[in-house]
Image (cartoon, rainbow, N blue to C red):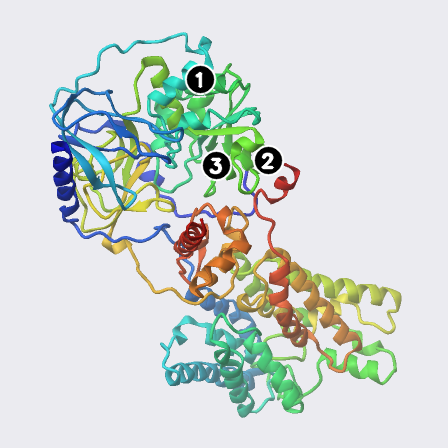
């Protein structure tokens, strides 16, 4: 058994709500809103005009710059608008709106490719880039960039992240159970691209079904399926690497600095679909869950489907919705509108009722040190909180605030209910402001 | 150009869409743990119930009076101060109750009522509120008040009673504590002899002289186990404090048993157990890191045993913890956790 020592938390878990519900295809929406920015990096350039007819899988936005990823139409229909629309990040984003013609017609010329493991890694990377694949665990870092480390970084290990440590979420769990073959084949492609022999799939031990399915699918391939203990944030890249390999990513560095590439299991399946069938990333598995929604489940949702459509298809709200969160309860983003679209990185939609939400005033820090003990990066969150409150963001640098991954453990355990993560974000924003002023 | 305009129109439309229903927006995380200040403080009160009951059993009505008056004083002081300073009155959070109960449990049964009142007000107003209230006090308020009373009213603070269990018909008599006897023996230079002999069972269950709440190791350990189980305290401070006392006293006892008391004597007498589990572990005044807590516990243990063996007072636990409270900010400044990925960078 692999474990993170002494750090992290055991939050309330609600995976049971959806863990055994099979993936179901969500009814096609009448329109989709596809933001040109669904990834970390530069937004892409639109390739279509208002009035154009597009088909499913058609590229409608081209990647711009190295850290970027293209977007594709997830339905067939007519482009009815291009402009700024609500985006799950809380801002508005340049998006392409497509009205469905109901035919769900494919582009022509899709070719199946069976001997992908003998292909040149460079060609495979191009396929992955053109398929618009990004990290589907939620970080949405363009996958092809991760697969293109600078030459001096020697990669020896690929890790697939199937930890899914966020409470409530079961999308990766179901994906691993129902699409284990795709995940393993995707892993083989990733390992082939990186030229490595060492591959591990890390899964939290509360998912025996997924572990069994992947062990079966991976038998004879040399890929190790590693059961890691259930502890949040086990699925954070840095934590998972430490748990599986016993190595730490240098502070301020990336996994590639210690020869590791980490990809989400959903990303691996998307890579497989792109390489084998030429299918770009136009849908994903989303866990819809929470007290506030009538029908919980795991759904295959087209990218660009509006939250409103998802809610309607899931039987509407149960009671008065209080918060709707894209992602999990610990790192997800609260939404302000029902008109935001599901993106490549939307792993879950959590609907909390008004009654679930307690809004309390925060109290003074009682120096209990629980945040210090919970921090998986072993920082001093108490200091960030105190310095933010005192209006001294500059001094937080001394406490290595930039190493913080904003996992939320500190805030979860704080008995004074201090909004530590929010205070950390405030400090980071102030630091960025100060830096921009100097530059 | 036409496209541009169309785009802007659409954009406006997008912006004007009314967000319905009204949704609550906050920064993540959206799930919070169940522990609050209230829960933790009241859990500490609950954990002190066995020791309180033991005190009531052995000292009867006198103990009851001290406990009630002291707790009432801290609650009144907290409410009064918060009212007069225009703050929200938060005596519900249990922190003043904890302070009151802890102070009461460290007082001798024979102490007069006004001692409790002075102690309670001193603890809350001087030691806590004047520093800014809960979280800002550098010293454990209960202990600081006890130290103050000990220095200001030495006679009243050493009026110990011999245990007179309820329903046995024994009357209250004043007597000495084992540590007091030990000091007398030590200072008169007669060798400790008789003074260091202790009925282990009596000392363990609490049938010895001492402050109301410190006498029964058994009752205190039951409460401590509850706090450890709830994870409101960790083992680091108690283990390192008690360990240090036992190891040091053990070394001297091994070298010269005629002059020094054995480690078990030191463990079961005086306030070591209540101090190590309930006082030194006070969240506000101990270091935030576990490594810092180990060092803190070591310091508490060391000062305790030095005072007990060579000091002018028979007991040193309160002084030791208050002195180490002074060092806490320094420990927190210099002992920090090694952050993830920090060492590897030097190699790279």
C-alpha gap between disc 2 and disc 3: 13 Å
If you read the primary sequence from the N terminus, does the residue marked by circle 2 or circle 3 appear first? Answer: 3
> Which chain's residue wears label 1?
A
Looking at the picture, tell me which residue is in the foreground, B159 or B283: B283
Q: CA distance from mark 2 to mark 1?
A: 25 Å
Q: Which residue is mark 3?
A: A237
Mark 1 and mark 3 in contact (Cβ < 8 Å)? no
Q: Position of residue B63 (x, y in %)?
A: 55, 83
Q: Circle 1 sits on which residue?
A: A189
To which residue does mark 2 refer? A246
Circles 2 and 1 on the same chain: yes
Quarter where residue B290 is shown: bottom right
Question: The residue tagged with tag 3: helix, strand or loop?
Answer: helix
Q: Few, some or many C-alpha atoms within 10 Å of disc 2 (few <14, some 14-19, many ≥20)?
A: few
| SS category of the residue bearing label 1 | helix
Q: Quadrant of the C terminus of chain B?
A: top right
| In the displayed structure image, the side of residue A340 where residue A260 appears, left or right | right
Residue at point 49% right, 48% down?
A402
């Amino acid at each position: 058994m692999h474990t993170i020592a002494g750090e992290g938390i055991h939050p309330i878990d609600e995976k049971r709500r959806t863990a055994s519900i099979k993936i179901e295809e969500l009814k096609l929406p009448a329109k989709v809103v596809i933001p040109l920015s669904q990834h970390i990096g530069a937004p892409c350039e639109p390739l279509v005009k208002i009035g154009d007819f597009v088909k499913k899988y058609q590229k409608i936005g081209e990647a711009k710059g190295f850290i970027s990823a293209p977007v594709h139409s997830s339905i067939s229909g007519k482009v009815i608008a291009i402009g700024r629309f609500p985006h799950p990040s809380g801002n508005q984003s340049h998006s392409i709106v497509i009205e469905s013609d109901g035919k769900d017609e494919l582009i022509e010329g899709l070719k199946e490719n069976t001997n992908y493991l003998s292909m040149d890694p460079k060609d495979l990377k191009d396929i992955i880039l053109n398929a618009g694949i990004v990290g589907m665990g939620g970080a949405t870092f363009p996958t092809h960039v991760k697969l293109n480390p600078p030459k001096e970084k020697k990669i020896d290990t690929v890790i697939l992240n199937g930890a899914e440590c966020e409470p409530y979420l079961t999308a990766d769990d179901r994906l691993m159970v129902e699409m284990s073959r795709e995940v393993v084949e995707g892993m083989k492609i990733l390992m082939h691209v990186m030229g490595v022999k060492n591959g591990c799939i890390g899964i939290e031990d509360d998912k025996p079904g997924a572990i069994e399915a992947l062990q079966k699918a991976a038998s004879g391939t040399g890929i190790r399926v590693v059961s890691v203990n259930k502890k949040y944030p086990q699925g954070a890249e840095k934590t998972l690497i430490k748990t599986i390999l016993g190595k730490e990513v240098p502070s301020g560095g990336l996994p590639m600095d210690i020869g590791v590439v980490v990809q989400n299991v959903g990303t691996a399946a998307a890579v497989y679909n792109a390489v084998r069938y030429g299918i770009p990333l136009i849908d994903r598995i989303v866990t819809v869950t929470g007290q506030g929604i009538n029908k919980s489940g795991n759904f295959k949702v087209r990218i660009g489907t509006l939250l409103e459509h998802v809610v309607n298809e899931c039987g509407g709200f149960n009671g008065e919705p209080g918060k709707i969160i894209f992602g999990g309860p610990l790192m997800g983003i609260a939404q302000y509108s029902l008109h935001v679209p599901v993106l490549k990185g939307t792993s879950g939609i959590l609907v909390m009722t008004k009654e679930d939400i307690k809004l309390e005033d925060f109290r003074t820090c009682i120096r209990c040190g629980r945040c210090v003990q919970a921090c998986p990066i072993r920082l001093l969150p108490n200091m960030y909180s105190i310095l933010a409150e005192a209006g001294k963001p500059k001094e937080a640098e001394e406490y290595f605030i930039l190493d913080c991954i904003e996992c939320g453990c500190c805030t979860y355990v704080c008995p004074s209910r201090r909004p530590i993560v929010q205070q950390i974000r405030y400090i980071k924003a102030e630091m960025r402001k100060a830096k921009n002023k100097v530059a | 150009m036409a496209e541009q305009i169309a785009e802007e129109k659409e954009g406006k439309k997008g912006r004007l869409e009314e967000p319905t229903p009204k949704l609550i927006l906050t920064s993540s995380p959206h799930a919070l743990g169940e522990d609050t200040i209230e829960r933790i403080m009241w859990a500490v009160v609950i954990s002190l119930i066995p020791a309180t009951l033991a005190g009531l059993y052995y000292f009867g009505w006198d103990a009851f009076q001290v406990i009630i008056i002291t707790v009432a004083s801290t609650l009144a002081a907290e409410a009064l101060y918060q009212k007069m300073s225009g703050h929200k009155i938060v005596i519900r959070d249990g922190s003043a109750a904890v302070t009151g109960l802890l102070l009461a449990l460290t007082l001798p049964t024979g102490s007069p009522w006004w001692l409790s009142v002075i102690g309670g007000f001193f603890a809350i107003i001087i030691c806590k509120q004047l520093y800014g209230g809960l979280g800002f006090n550098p010293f454990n308020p209960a202990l600081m008040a006890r130290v103050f009373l000990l220095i200001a009213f030495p006679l009243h603070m050493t009026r110990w009673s011999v245990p007179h269990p309820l329903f046995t018909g024994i009357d209250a008599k004043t007597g000495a504590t084992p540590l007091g006897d030990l000091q007398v023996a030590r200072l008169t230079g007669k060798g400790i002899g008789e003074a260091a002999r202790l009925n282990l069972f009596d000392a363990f269950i609490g049938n010895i002289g001492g402050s109301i709440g410190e006498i029964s190791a058994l009752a205190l350990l039951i409460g401590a186990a509850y706090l450890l189980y709830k994870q409101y305290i960790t083992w680091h401070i108690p283990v390192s404090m008690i360990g240090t006392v036992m190891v040091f006293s053990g070394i001297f006892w091994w070298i010269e048993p005629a002059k020094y008391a054995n480690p078990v004597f030191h463990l079961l007498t005086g306030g070591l157990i209540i101090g190590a589990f309930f006082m030194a572990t006070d969240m506000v005044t101990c270091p935030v890191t576990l490594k810092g807590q180990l060092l803190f516990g070591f310091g508490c243990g060391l000062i305790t045993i030095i005072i007990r063996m060579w000091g002018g007072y028979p007991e040193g636990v309160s002084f030791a913890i208050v002195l180490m409270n002074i060092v806490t900010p320094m420990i927190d400044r210099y002992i920090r956790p090694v952050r993830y990925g920090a060492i590897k960078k030097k190699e790279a």
